[in-house]
Structure formats: C-alpha cells, structure tokens
Image (spheres, rainbow, N blue to C red):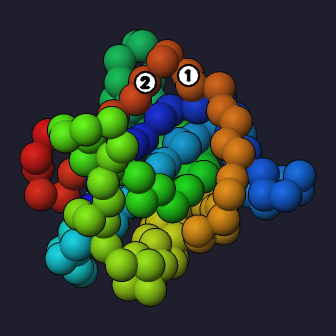
Amino acid sequence: MRAVVQRVTRASVTVGGEVVGRIDRGLCVLLGAGAGDAEPDLAYVVDKIVGMRIFSDDAGKMNLSVQDVGGGVLCISQFTLYGDARKGRRPGFTDALEPVAAKALYEQALARIAAAGVPVAAGIFAADMQVELINDGPVTILLDSRKQF
C-alpha cells in the first residue's frame, strides 16, 4: 500500500458539492492499494499513520503522533498513487489493486484507524472528489508498505 500523509491544520473532501468528510488538526492521507497488497501491507501503513511522530512537542521537535495530539485523520482512496508514467504521456494503472479488493482494504484501514482511537473521516471510494487542505509546515511524508521509497 502507498500513502501520502500530510500534516494539516484542517482538511475536507467534497463529493457532488457536499462535504462528506472534514477534520481540523490532524493528517490528510491519500491511500492507495497495489496489486498483491494484503493484511501485512495494511497493518504497516495504518501503524505508520497513527504512530508516526510528525507533530511538534513543546520544544518544537517533531516528536508527537496524531494520537498524542488528539488529531483526526481524513483518509481519501487514491488509486492513482500506483500510476506509472515512465513511458509515454499517459500514466498506466496496472499496478493498482482491482477495485473490489482495494475498497475492502480501504474500509479496513478506516476501521483500524478508528480502532486506534483516532477520529477518522473519509471520502467516498471511487467517487470524483475535491480535497481541500491547509498543509501545516508543510509536512508531507510518503509511505510504501514494500519500502520502494
């Protein structure tokens, strides 16, 4: 699985003109599932999302997690994280997990984040979404369960 994790002061996702998910301080996560992803990939990424220390402590050091600061997570499904643009001008998405299995992993990720005690908001899987956020820092971290980057 891949994730783009952004520390935010606020974020929201809109579908069809209606806000379907919103958080204040926390993380905006774009989450994609790749072909062959399974439970270990899900566990790795969710553990990183809820435990990664990218919020500043009283000394100004990145030493606190979203759990520590009482923040939320806005999680958006994003199959385009598996876009391959090395050839030609149009990215290919053959490395993305097929939609039924990807949706199941996405829903499991939402449930696991919530089970970790972190408030979670979400987009709508496979919908045309508009995401707005204020990136705090800016801080943006890339995750890949296969550690390709």
Residue lying at the far front in this picture: please name it.
88
Other-residue count near label 1 (Cα within 10 Å), few / some / many at <14 / 14–19 / ≥20: some
Horizontal arrangement in the rendering, residue 44 relative to residue 51 (left or right) = left
Q: Is residue 40 above or below residue 3?
A: below
Which of the 4 image quarters holds residue 9? top right
Q: CA distance from mark 2 to mark 1?
A: 6 Å
113 and 133: which one is in front? Answer: 133
Q: Which residue is mark 1?
A: 136
The quarter of the displayed image where residue 56 is located: top left
User: Where on the picture, by quarter, is residue 32?
Assistant: bottom left
Q: Amino acid at mark 2?
A: Val
| Residue 139, numbered circle | 2
Image quadrant where one finds the C terminus: top left
- Check disc 1 and give the amino acid type: Asp
Query: Residue, x 49% and y 16% (percent of image)?
Result: 137
How far across and how far down the image is residue 99, in percent? 44, 78
Residue in the image at 11% along x and 50% along y:
147
